[in-house]
Image (cartoon, rainbow, N blue to C red):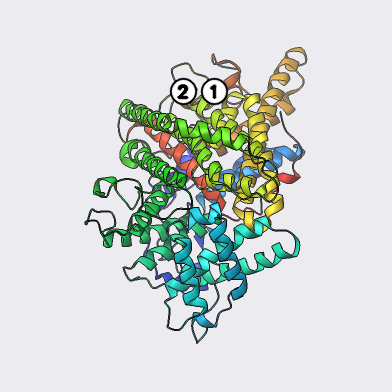
Amino acid sequence: MLRELAISIHNRSPSVSVTEGRPPSLAQGLTGSSPAARDSTDIVYGVEDDDDNDSAFEGDSSMAAQTVFASEFLENTVTRTLQPDLDPDMKSALSSLQQIVNMQNRPSPHESRFANAKPLPKGGVRELPMPPAHVVVAALRELKDVPLASFATICTFIAAENFAERCSKVYFATDDYSLMTWGVVNAGLYFLLQEKASLAEGAQRAQLLEYQSLCRDNLETALVNLPLLLPARKESIEVLLLGAFYAIEISKFSVARDLNSIAATLCQTLGYHRIRGNDGSGSKAILFWSCYLLDKALSIRSGRAPAIHDYDITVPRGLGDGVVDLPDASWRVVLNQWISYADFLGRAYEQLYSPAALARPQEQRAESARQLVQTMVNLAKEQEPLMRHTRDKVRGIKFDANSPFPMDMAILGDELMHWSALTLVYRAIPSPPGSPSTFNHECIHAARQAFTLHQEYMEMAGDSLAVKAGCIRWNLIYVPFTPVIILFCHIVETSDEADLRRLADFVDSLQPVVCAHGHAAEGIAKFHRVCQVLHNVAALCVRARKAARARRQQQQQDPSLPQQDHDMAMVGENIDMYLSQLGFMPPFGTIQSAAHPPMQGGEASQFGGGGGAQGEMSSVGFNNAGGAQGSELGNWFSGNTHILGLLEEDLSEFEPRMWPSMGG
């Protein structure tokens, strides 16, 4: 009856628009493009809010277009069946799952994309306050002697000497300077002061953070006032790229993608992606490859096609000697590795998770995945000597509280990204028949390796929160850290308590950085909160399955205990429903609940798991083009994208810190 009700609601629901909305000018704010999110930027910048505005395109695998009835059905029907005296931790876990699904299927109001932007005064940006000149001059002098890794990485296409010239042009202006130049200076100072503040203490740290906030406001002001038709000039690309890096820092990945897409278009307009003779300018190469790095990672994170296509590139891959002035020769190796890794991510999306890939026969897609695995293995072999040398070097360093994020940790981060990427690729290869899990053994192994490396890096970081924050921000948040979702789903399916402990340790490793860095770690705080919710739900699944198993044993001796067993079964069915709407399980109704006798799969099918990929796929709410396996993979990828997109949402309603311990 419930299934028929769901079908009828689905048939009455209006189709969801999957056409891309008209983008306003940059001065009106960037268009919303994160999954199931619509912000109030249009209202802030004076654009009328009417029903004719097209919703942002969410990707072909969007669950919103496939299950428009889910939120109302779950809210009004399923949760009412639970007993009012259910354990508070179970209610909290189910409530968080329901909120996640609601955020996926309903537009949610956002604050302005750049809430700190200030109105431009009549006299222009010259009248806006800047950090004192003597503070900036002192910081630039120190930068020449001791390059800061984070600043050098993010601003690597602006050499330290060149950046000092930009600052001089703004602070000691004799001629007019453009909005783009002003934005570049404030962006560079934002990252520079941020890293200096992380290494300072007391009143000095507070003062540097105040100046950093000033640069943040100026940078946001510059970004929202950029014209829609930017001039095709180098400084336009620079300010857009720095704005994209800043958006990543504050976990606004859809804004970062929009900014970087414009920068990529300008790079191609200027021919930076083509061989046009050797003009001796290394800045063109570094600008283009910086766009390329962000383009591929943000593409697979959002489930959207990249703006730069590899078949259109003729410029030599990587950065040769003398292309750009880097603080250390090893950075050239690191950047070239990142370019290869970005190329791998682009191919993974195109061959495994794009709409065209999901429509291919399963075996063809699996063969593409195997070839990509071999590509990554070959890359790892090339990097092995450097990795071994760097690991030995880092183990001999004692990072204290004032240690900055070093280049060596950035090199080691590539090893973690290696296993994270393999996890995503192995997911596209079906598990063998009879497997207790949807995921094949190699996929689970790669996810566990990524977790192990993360814990190793946290131990290497010692007492330095700056090192830990750098590892988390660029190894786990910037790139799609798929192992979190893989282990979460695997725990739900199999109740693997060792993996549950891995997930708990992972969540605990994020906590110190969240507590110490405050606003500077807002993105890390959101990531920690999302992972905490996933851990609590997984722990509830393990706990409920144990209880259901014990209850069945008790019922064999005392048949008068039906009510609590019914409660536990309803908990399982609720979790099944929510996870199926996220794409992490087959459609609800094809999965056996805890209230029924076990199937031949054993305990794995007794509580919300064991169905996995082995269950018969329903056509309700799923796009069957490409077959059931393609639909299942596409919906899992959509759920993975949505969970990653939660870092752009307001997560204040999630309060996992108040939950009791449910460690298994």
The image position of residue 118, as x and y in percent, is: 55, 75
Q: Do the residues under discs 2 and 1 have CB atoms within 8 angstroms?
A: yes
Label 1 Cα crowd, 10 Å radius (few <14 / some 14-19 / many 20+): many
Please identify the quarter of the rendering in which residue 541 is found.
top right
Look at mark 1 in the image and give the residue it sits on.
610
**Secondary structure beneath disc 1?**
loop
Look at mark 2 in the image and give the residue it sits on.
614
Q: Decide if residue 585 is on the left or right side of residue 501.
A: left
Residue depicted at 44% across the width and 61% down the height? 158
* Kind of residue at disc 1: Gly
Of 489 and 481, nearer the camera is 481
Of 576 and 438, nearer the camera is 438
Whether residue 608 can be seen here? no
Separation of marks 2 and 1 at Cα, in angstroms? 8 Å
* In this view, 569 is above or below 206: above
Residue farthest to the front, as pictured = 145
Residue depicted at 61% across the width and 40% down the height? 78
Q: Quadrant of the C terminus?
A: top right
* In this view, 644 is above or below 396: below
The image position of residue 223, as x and y in percent, is: 47, 69
Whether residue 205 can be seen here? yes
**Secondary structure beneath disc 2?**
helix
Residue depicted at 73% across the width and 58% down the height? 201
Please identify the quarter of the rendering in which residue 365 is found.
top left
Of 522 and 374, nearer the camera is 374
The image position of residue 254, as x and y in percent, is: 46, 56
Residue depicted at 60% across the width and 32% down the height? 573
* Kind of residue at disc 2: Gln
Q: Decide if residue 94 is on the left or right side of residue 124.
A: right
